[in-house]
């Protein structure tokens, strides 16, 4: 939602956050978030309230009770799985749109696991509520961590430079969404594709480029708006994109793409998996399967996750090989770097064949055309 209506909500929230007495500034942001959810999705308001209450009960009222933490953790995971299972196009009667559930669920899991480790000894209800009910990152992230947010709550003061940075960042986000994403990619490039033969190799390849570019400009645009909105409120939220299509290998791509999600997965899935299995291959595949299921609980997204997981695992082994060391230090290192970039970007583009279409048969057709095996 990037309409004038959303701009009005942002203006109201920012005004309330700075014009209210200091003791009421953070509660006013929470109130704006609750009001926003109540207007656009009462179901979301109810679910977030329940999740917040159970999380606070386990972390604050029952502090030190690992059984309570585990019970709430399992409840949240099952709730998210149920949401993914029952909100599918073919189940129209059971579809319930829950604003931000996929994002704040990962934040809750992060907090519960940190509580289990004993890293939240001084957590208070006011901090938990302010962190979970934070409008800038509610709908599409980034998945910001609790400790930086807690620190900003303490240090938060009016800062002209920070406010200016927030406005600039939001303007950049809107430019990505409207000019680059919507106008150039979704309209102009789509029109160009519409006059090409639909069964040609170039049509399929450029369609994947269009899908990837649209996804990047829109998602990074939303992230810029969220980061800028947070800056207007006096909070610094972690970056979510860092020119991912300049990556030279698939591991580097995931250090640049959806950074808050990939770092979450690396810390809470990859590291535990590798400590248990002692296998970077299994840990990488497990991590990307989790990411695939997080996006959508379907075979196509699980295959997408497996594709990236195997790619990351192969990249991990390749980076330790002696041949790679020879290639990156040879006279032709620049050409090798260019080849690695082309290989990485095409590896990512092929993965879009799983997620840009609705059926596996359509994915199969994409892959057959791209590999030259279609009739």
Image (cartoon, helix red, strand yellow):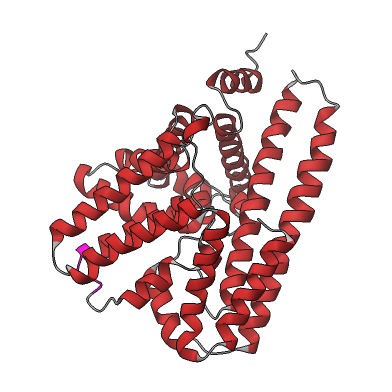
Q: Is residue 276 left or right of residue 268?
A: left
- Residue for point 50% across, 37% down: 95
Q: Quadrant of the N terminus?
A: bottom right
Depicted 116 relative to depicted 268: above or below: below
Question: Is 283 in front, or is 166?
Answer: 166
Numbered circles on residues, count: 0
Residue 125 rendering spot, x and y as whole percentages: 31, 75
Residue 26 rendering spot, x and y as whole percentages: 47, 80
Q: Is residue 192 left or right of residue 207?
A: right
Question: Is 318 in front, or is 182?
Answer: 182
User: Mainly helix, strand or loop, the magenta region?
Assistant: loop
Q: Quadrant of the C terminus?
A: top right
- Residue for point 52% across, 59% down: 37
**Residue closest to the far top:** 375
- Residue for point 31% across, 54% down: 268
Residue 202 rendering spot, x and y as whole percentages: 75, 27
Depicted 84 relative to depicted 354: above or below: below
Question: Is 163 in front, or is 67?
Answer: 67
Write the start and end of the magenta stretch as one range: 116-120
Question: Is 49 in front, or is 308?
Answer: 49
Depicted 115 relative to depicted 247: above or below: below
Task: Decide whether residue 162 is among the magenta residues.
Answer: no
Residue 107 rendering spot, x and y as whole percentages: 38, 60
Q: Quadrant of residue 200?
A: top right
> Can residue 69 be seen by looking at this rendering?
yes
> Can residue 100 be seen by looking at this rendering?
no
Q: Is residue 2 left or right of residue 51?
A: right
């Amino acid at each position: 939602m990037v309409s004038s209506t959303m701009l009005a909500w942002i203006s109201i929230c920012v005004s309330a956050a700075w014009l209210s007495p200091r003791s009421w500034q953070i509660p006013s942001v929470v109130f704006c978030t609750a009001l926003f959810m109540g207007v656009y999705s009462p179901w979301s308001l109810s679910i977030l309230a329940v999740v917040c209450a159970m999380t606070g009960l386990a972390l604050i009222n029952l502090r030190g009770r690992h059984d309570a933490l585990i019970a709430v953790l399992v409840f949240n995971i099952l709730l998210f799985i149920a949401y993914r299972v029952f909100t599918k196009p073919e189940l129209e009667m059971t579809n319930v749109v829950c604003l931000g559930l996929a994002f704040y669920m990962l934040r809750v899991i992060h907090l519960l696991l940190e509580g289990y480790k004993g890293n939240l000894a001084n957590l208070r209800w006011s901090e938990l509520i302010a962190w979970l009910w934070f409008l800038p990152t509610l709908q599409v992230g980034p998945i910001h961590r609790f400790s930086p947010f807690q620190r900003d709550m303490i240090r938060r003061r009016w800062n002209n430079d920070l406010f200016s940075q927030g406005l600039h960042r939001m303007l950049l986000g809107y430019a990505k969404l409207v000019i680059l994403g919507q106008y150039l990619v979704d309209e102009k490039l789509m029109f160009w594709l519409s006059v090409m033969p639909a069964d040609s190799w170039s049509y399929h390849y450029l369609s994947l480029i269009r899908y990837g570019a649209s996804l990047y400009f829109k998602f990074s645009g939303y992230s810029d708006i969220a980061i800028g909105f947070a800056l207007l409120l006096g909070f610094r939220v972690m970056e979510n994109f860092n020119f991912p299509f300049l990556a030279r290998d698939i591991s580097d791509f995931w250090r640049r793409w959806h950074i808050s999600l990939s770092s979450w997965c690396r810390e809470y899935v990859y590291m535990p998996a590798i400590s248990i299995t002692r296998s970077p291959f299994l840990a990488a595949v497990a991590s990307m399967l989790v990411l695939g299921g997080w996006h959508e609980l379907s075979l196509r997204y699980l295959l997408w996750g497996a594709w990236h997981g195997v790619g990351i695992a192969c990249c991990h082994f390749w980076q330790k090989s002696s041949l790679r060391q020879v290639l990156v230090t040879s006279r032709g290192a620049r050409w090798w770097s260019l080849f690695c970039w082309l290989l990485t970007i095409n590896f990512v583009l092929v993965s879009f064949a799983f997620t840009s279409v609705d059926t596996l048969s359509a994915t199969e057709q994409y892959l057959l055309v791209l590999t030259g095996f279609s009739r």
